[in-house]
Image (cartoon, helix red, strand yellow):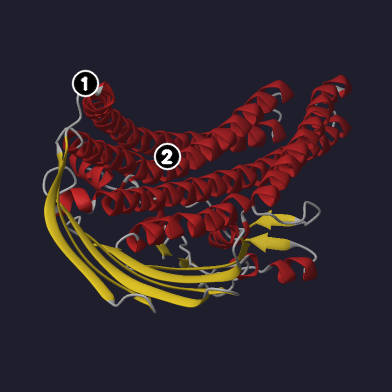
Amino acid sequence: MMRCCLLLCLLPGITTAALRSPGQIIPGAVSAKAVAARDELVLSLSDAIALALRDNRSIRSAYLQRIADKFELRVAADRYAPQLSFKAQYQANRNQDDRYRQAELTPSASVLTAYGTRVSLDWAYGQTRGNAAGPRYRDGANLMLIQPLLRGAGRDIAMAPLHQAELAEQANRLALKDQVSHTITSIIGLYRDLLRAQEQLNITDDARQRASQLIAVNRELIDAGRMAAFEIVQAEAELANQELALEGSRNNLHAGRLALLQALALDLDTPLRVSEEAEAEPIGLDPRRALAQAEALQPIYLLQVLADQQADLVLRLAKDQQRWDLSLIGATSQARERPNSGKVWEHYLGLQLEIPIADLSRRQGLVRAQVAVDSRRLQLADARQQLQREVVDGVREVQVSWRQLQIAGRALDLSRRKLAIEQEKLALGLSSNFQVLSFESDLRGAQSARLDAQIAYLNAQTALDLILGTTLDSWDVAIND
């Protein structure tokens, strides 16, 4: 099976124009300009996946969503960076005694540490100029420190918002991986549907040609006097039926082509033909190893694991809210006003205590968080059992499909031999049109069954890749931020 190697780049400053240029595509991958320049687009499966990952609208929408997702993590991390602000004010005032103008400048800075300590520093400068009173100046600085000792204390609690954002970012990446995996699986399904339609058209056309050859043999037998003239009607009716089936096959081919073109975001008028041969090879599967792989890689299951971790974090925060609010507070300030007074300074250090009384809302948050944790435990257990069932079913489906493919191959070989023998007997006058047409119908059924079994086996492998979370690895697709 051919593989494609793609690098999907999600950059903070990505634009719509940048989405049109994939990070890395295998040589020979088809571009939109090349599609427009060709009379017929011959597409391999790896090329189809490459086009889908670059131009599929749902994937491009996911790229855009990642811009907002990554910025949310940046905002959460910025919570612990120094925060600066600047405030300015100018007023013209008037009262019964005087007219005066007042200006103020107040820059400030604050920082929240990983242990919940909040330090703030601000400086204020102001001046007032009155027509009668003259100018007055004042300035001062304040430094304050607040350290929680009970509620909000400790690194785990203080850093909880950042941890929540990191878990959310992991969930967003898993959701993107799941979406890309489903898109690849969908494209593979549409590609093989079109491949099936092409092969089915060939099967029907071959049957039509054999029906024409049978008519020619009938005419020779009639001319030789070895067959009654009315018996050719059976062969002519078979030819009409095959021409009818051929029209249906052409319609299915057209519908499959449109579905794949739409998924690839290509012009629906593009003449398209798929070139990949449906090669089927046996694979060795161990259900236990497959389950361990799924538990480590499958995005949907890992999202449940992350949701369980998020619920635990919310419960820790809810328990922290039940504590008293006891904080150590310290501050120092200095002010000066001219021309009436000199410097004035003040320092203080103390404790601040707040005790909630009869506040059921805090208890309500704890109850909800505990219920959410218990519920998540049940959902995670159900998700693991569901994953185990899907893995077992997927492995069994691959194994059964392979056995069916082998049986269908043997049945096809026997049908071909059976028809060839009967055609030789008809040429010698030892058989009848009815018998040949019956075996012809058997051959068409065997060909269709062999094709369906082959596509079903390949699709079972693709479905198992999706269950195990290995779709991106199987097609060498990397999602890098």
The spot of residue 57 in percent (x, y) is 63, 52
271 lies above or below 300: below
Residue type marked 1: Ala
Residue 458, disc: none
Q: Observer-nearest residue: 442 or 216?
A: 442
Residue 358, disc: 1
Q: Observer-nearest residue: 468 or 94?
A: 94
Q: Quadrant of residue 241?
A: top right
The spot of residue 199 in percent (x, y) is 64, 45
Q: Quadrant of residue 379?
A: top left
Q: CA distance from mark 1 to mark 2?
A: 60 Å
Label 2 belongs to which residue?
460
Q: Is residue 280 visible?
A: no
Q: Is residue 406 left or right of residue 152?
A: right
Q: Is residue 73 visible?
A: yes
200 lies above or below 173: above
Quadrant of the frame with the C terminus:
bottom left
Number of numbered discs present? 2
The spot of residue 285 in percent (x, y) is 26, 44
43 lies above or below 157: below
Q: Observer-nearest residue: 343 or 407?
A: 343
Counting residues from the start of the chain, the first of labels 1 and 2 encountered is: 1
